[in-house]
Image (cartoon, rainbow, N blue to C red):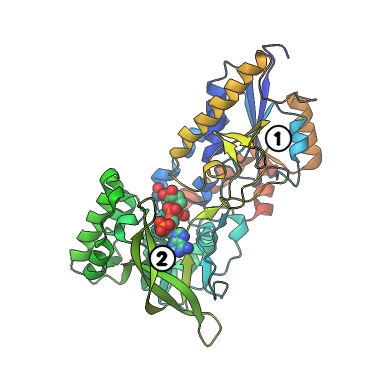
Amino acid sequence: MPDDSPIRVAVIGSGPAGFYAAGHLLKDSAGRVEVDMLERLPTPWGLVRSGVAPDHPKIKSVSRVYEKTAEHPRFRFFGNVCFGEDISREDLLAHYHAIVYATGSAIDRPLGIPGEELPGSHAATDFVGWYNGHPDQADLEVDLLSAERALVIGNGNVALDLGRMLVLNSSELATTDTADHALEVLARSRVREVVIVGRRGPAQAAFTNPELRELGELSEADVVVDPSELERGLAVPDPSLKDNAIARQNVEILRRYSERAVAGKPRRIAMRFLLSPVRLIPDEAGRVGAVELVRNELVPDEKGTLRARPTAARETIDAGLVFRAIGYRGLPLPGVPFDERQGVIPNDGGRVTDPSTGVTRPGEYVVGWIKRGPTGVIGTNKRDAQQTVDAILADLAERRNGSGGELSPDSPDAASVERLLIARKPDLVPYDGWLEIDRHERVHGERQGRPRVKLTRIDEMLRIAAAESPDPEE
Ligand code: NAP
């Protein structure tokens, strides 16, 4: 390969990790790298569009960074193209020098307890997708009319997002990009209390400080922490606290909540600790009616980390809705190695490895949650993507010296893969098509004083994208 010929990279997935990888590749490659991004949906941005809570527009504004990357002349977007269905790994190997998997963690981790599948019990991933207008969850039925109390299991930021969304009032939601179907249901919600349950203590919660603080500033809901339960949760000293300022601050915030007088707002969020659900109990109608929980104590494991150990004490909490927010999991991709236990693609610093031999697979890389698991905030993916891009660029440099690890594709020209993609998926959505969807959503949003009114149906998105965008073959 001559030294100045383009290096063609396919990025699979258009969330933050995929966009940061594309941005780093285009910035650091001395003009040689071209990036094609393939996305299952007609819309880009992954969890920035369908995960970040609608009342956090500042966090969503990170999409401007991705828009800049998308405007780069050596970047192309192919939406509505599903890896493994419309195009295979083998197809990509024939067209690209490197593939970067950036498919995130699409599904929830189950609790594995009886009653989990009862109506009224939901995965956080589904509820979050539903209020954010993800097409996969557009038809989810969330009954907010039958239940007055909802239980959220888990002590991470997703649990806080859910808790907040359940107690915001309709005028607060009306200025957000919450999906219309969810706005309508949330406006009529009868939920008055949300109980957020952690299996360990206040010091082990995975909340970040601004998110936990925000809970205490809600206009419609008191936040309630039982002082004796808080102190019970802190009774066993946690040695990791001395190096964890976030956790120390969380404890302070929770202590302030426990000391605060209840203001008598119409709704409340109760924070409970040292409890694990053991079964969901149906009501007469066969829906979730209550949750049986076991009280835990904290005991150090061999490394000194405090773990939850069940005691004999049990408690039952009436709740007509249960949300499990105990973490996400990646899905395997056809033909790509997968670590079932961790729910990630096995890798060595971003280079995909064969799980049986540990040997790296030339030309295949991974970024984001599907690389390291569902941890960290959006910005974490920037650093993470840089590590992978450094590996790609190092492999390319070695290749030039005759020993590197990228691929030697048969048809590395940009036009041939575009022809293939259009043949396989005539209604693929190029970046201009997404810009039409974006414009349509923003125009409708502006009329209602909202950032956008989201389209939630694929066919509708395709119609808007195709009606206005130039024929990709022209
Ligand atoms: P997370 O931060 O990993 O929290 C998961 C929680 O579930 C932990 O409290 C964990 O407890 C608990 N858990 C796990 N298995 C459990 C079980 N079997 N029974 C009961 N509890 C269980 O996950 P997340 O909330 O899904 O968030 C994912 C990532 O996205 C995080 O990095 C988060 O910070 C980020 N995020 C950020 C924002 C924001 O910045 N605004 C918003 C949403 C999400 P243990 O600690 O005991 O395992």
Q: Nearer the viewer, mark 1 or mark 2?
A: 2
Disc 1, SS = loop
Instruction: Name the residue located 79 percent from the left edge and 25 percent from the top edge.
Output: 411
Mark 1 → mark 2, Cα distance in angstroms: 42 Å
Residue 402 falls left or right of residue 384: right
Pointer 2 residue: 166
- Number of marks present in the image shown: 2
Q: Locate the C terminus by quadrant.
A: top right
Residue 163 located left or right of residue 425: left
Locate residue 313, reporting x and y percent: 36, 77
Q: Please, what is the three-letter code of the amino acid marked with disc 2?
A: Leu
402 shown above or below 214: above
Within 10 angstroms of label 2, few (less than 14), some, or many (20 or more) residues? many
Name the quadrant where ligand 1 sits: bottom left
What amino acid type is highlighted by mark number 1?
Answer: Pro
**In the foreground, 51 or 326:** 326
386 relative to 212 in the view: left or right:
right
Question: Is 426 located above or below residue 238 in the figure?
Answer: above
Taking the view exactly as shown, the residue that stands out farthest to the front is 302
Give percent across and percent down for residue 174. 42, 59
Task: Give the percent coordinates (x, y) of residue 438.
Answer: 56, 43
Residue where numbered disc 1 is placed: 470
Residue 319 picture location, percent across and down: 43, 77
**SS category of the residue bearing label 2:** helix
Q: Nearer the viewer, residue 233 or 270?
A: 233
Which quarter of the image is occupied by the N terminus?
top right
Note whether ligand 1 is within 8 Å of mark 1.
no
Can residue 48 be seen here?
yes
**Front-lying residue, 301 or 425:** 301
User: Residue 225: which numbered mark, if any?
Assistant: none
Residue at 62% x, 22% y is 395
Say if mark 1 contacts mark 2, CB within 8 Å: no
